[in-house]
Each structure stands twice: as structure tokens, then as C-alpha cells.
Amino acid sequence: MDKLLIQGGNRLNGDITISGAKNAALPILCAGLLTSSDVELSNVPNLHDVKTILKLLGQTGLKVLQDGDKVTLNGSAIDKTEAPYELVKTMRASILVLGPLLARFGTAKVSLPGGCNIGSRPVDQHIKGLQAMGAEITIEAGYIYAKCAKLKGARIVTDMITVTGTENLLMAATLAEGETVLENAACEPEVTDLANLLVAMGAKITGIGTNRLVIQGVSELHGAKHAVISDRIEAATFLCAVAAAGGDITIRNTRTDIMDAALDKLREIGVELTIGDNWIRAQMNKRPAPVTFRTTEYPGFPTDMQAQFMAVNTIADGASRVTETIFENRFMHVQEMNRLGAQIETDGNTAFIKGVEQLVGAPVMATDLRASASLVIAGLAARGETLVDRIYHLDRGYDQMEVKLSAVGANIQRIK
């Protein structure tokens, strides 16, 4: 099992190019199931989760042609409408094949999903929405069985804001009969990116970017070309790295207009930011100031950046408080950071951090995707050697993080 060995204390200087967004690429790849024509995608990140979803899509009969960051999908020969447990168990996003398969073929058998162990992420809202559109759904032996001769438009109000739920129901509604209204829809940029692709494929969607999506169903969708948006979480992660380690880096190929919450907190930390159309220069020459924040749905502070900002808070000049409102089990990095000398205490969904002048390297274990990134950031700022174990979590969502960090001066290497 691969590990990352980090010698802390190096400042970061240079350029980092951001990859396509994992959380946009996964639903966009599943949208290839909705048409028999070619869907040509670019800026697709090279991630373990992307490989998993392509393998899953390929076993349905969807043709997949990959060349670097370009992927062409063709759904003219799909002959299986099943997503088996052995593929779905490693990645919750696999549930995103349910809506497209049911909408186009009238049947789907999808294993209940797995993924990072960061808390309960039920799929009941997906099922509730599809049932409102006329689907018959049963759950047996760990599988969701869904069938419907033709989905029909409906007004769907989800009990909570759910990103994958919104994406699944949005894809299903494009081929439903009549009008579907999704109330309480997620507004994340990755949902917007999926909606923009669907429109390019011939879908009729209004309200894109808002919490009320209105979809007029069409009889079929056609092919399209689309570039996946850049990963705002990857970009903000590298900005946290320079906030913790110090230095002068420029982030390239990024979307500055969808990062307001993270950029505001980075300024509060003391990072000097210069922002262009698709780049951000970050300069940090002092000890971080502490920042208190609360995670919430977009456009609020993203739960996917909670751990990385907490890593910066561990060496801040003062105390801070972090409240996690999205996932109930997303503080598993705390005990690992405390092994590095951090002073963090938790009470329910709130963490209290007292900044220390210096972390000290130690062996630590990654527990989920974003926790992995936070431990890398802490290791960059620590004195001595930090060994991060179980980095297969990291590879699910970061495209060669150690290569990008090495290129800007970090002493970090992958150990096979």
C-alpha cells in the first residue's frame, strides 16, 4: 500500500495547474448513458474514482475511448442495466447511474453504495424522487431494483439539499414525459456543469444555478462536446498548503468565481491573494491567523475544505472553532493531527483548535479523501518527517498531488 513521505519546512514557490473537478466529472460521465450518440469530454481528471466509474460504465456496454484528459462515450450498444456491488462499494457516486439507466431503458439494478466513511449519506431522496416520477422501486439483498415503462414529470421537494440526489433526478427528468420541477435543489457549481452539458445534449432546463430547476422532458438526447470545470477543491487545497508552509505560488486553470467562501477565509488567514481570470497568486510570509467557520451548502463554506483549513488552524497564532454541519463523522483527521502535536478538542460537531507554533512530524493514517489532504498540509508545515499511510483515499480525488507539490519545492515522495 502506497504512502507519502514528507520532510516538512520547505516553502512553496512556483506554478500549479489544476485538474478537472472530480465532483463534476463523475455525474457528467454518467450522462453518457442518456444517449446513443458520442459525448466528447475534455479536462477529465486522472483519478481512481474516474477509473472506477469508467469501468462501471464500460460493463453496461457503454463504449469508452480515453486519450489523456479526453474521454469519448458512446451509448449505442448498452446491453446491461446493472451496477454490481464490487464496483459500487468503493464509491458512493456510482448511484448516479440509477437515474440515467431508468430514464432511458426503463429498468435499473444498482447496488447500494459505499465510499468514504465520513457519515450517513442515504439514497432515500434519490428513491423518493424517482418514485414521484412513477418508478416502481424495491430494495432486496443490498440492491436497488427500479423499473418504469416511462418516467413522468413531477414536482419533487427533497427533505434536504443533496448534490448527488439533484444530479440523479436532473438526469432522469431530461427524458421523462412532461415537466419536472426540482425544489430545494443543490446549487453547487458541479451541478451547474452537469446541467450545462445536458442542455448541450438537447435537454430543456431552466433555473440552472438556483435551488429550483425546471426540466421539460424530451424524447431523446444527442451527443455533445464539453469541458469539465476545474476543481475548486483541489485549487483551495493547494492554497491552504501555501498558507501553512509559506511561499509564493500561482494556481492556473482555475475558476475564481466559484471559490468565494474559501478565498475569503484565506484572506482572513493572512494570505495575500492576486486574482486573474483563471489564475490565483498566493503569497504567505507570516504565521497564519486563526479562522472560525461553519460548513454549509454552496455558496457557503464547503465541507470538502473543512479538514484542510483545520490543518492551517493548527499552527495559527490563536484559537479557532470549526463547526461541521454536513457530515456527522468528518472529524476523523483530528486524532491524527494531534499526533503531530496539534491541540484540537471536539464536542459533537464542533472542533476547538488552539494554534501551536510548530507541528512535529510523525506517522499518521488517512481516514478519508479530504482528511488525507489535510495531513499532507500538516506534514508540509511540520518539523521533521511525516509518513502518511493509506493514501489510496488521496488518489480518489487528487491527480498526482505529490508530483504537483514537488514541482513547487515540497520535499514529498511516494513510497510504494
Image (cartoon, grey):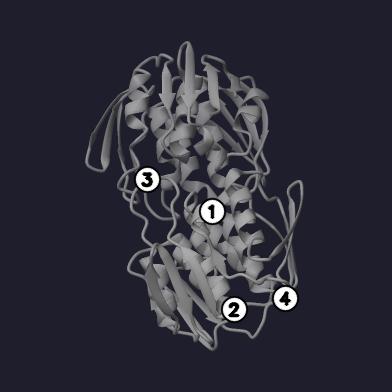
Instruction: Please name whichever residue, 400 or 140, is drawn nearer the observer in this view of the structure.
Output: 140
Quadrant for the C terminus, please: top right
> Where is residue 333 drawn, in percent x and y?
37, 32
- Residues at discs 3 and 1 in contact (Cβ within 8 Å): no
Tell me which amino acid carries mark 4.
Answer: His
Q: How far apart, in angstroms, are the residues tagged by discs 3 and 1?
A: 19 Å
Tell me which numbered mark, 3 or 1, is placed earlier along the sequence. 1
Tell me which numbered mark, 4 or 1, is placed earlier along the sequence. 1
Tell me which amino acid carries mark 2.
Answer: Phe
Is residue 323 visible from the viewing direction of this image? yes
Q: How far apart, in angstroms, are the residues tagged by discs 3 and 4?
A: 37 Å
Tell me which amino acid carries mark 1.
Answer: Leu
Report the residue marked by disc 3: 118
Q: How far apart, in angstroms, are the residues tagged by discs 4 and 2?
A: 16 Å
Report the residue marked by disc 1: 87
- Relative to 227, 214 lies left or right: left
- Relative to 283, 293 lies left or right: left
Report the residue marked by disc 2: 105
The residue at 38%/45% (across/down) is 117
> Where is residue 128 drawn, in percent x and y?
38, 74
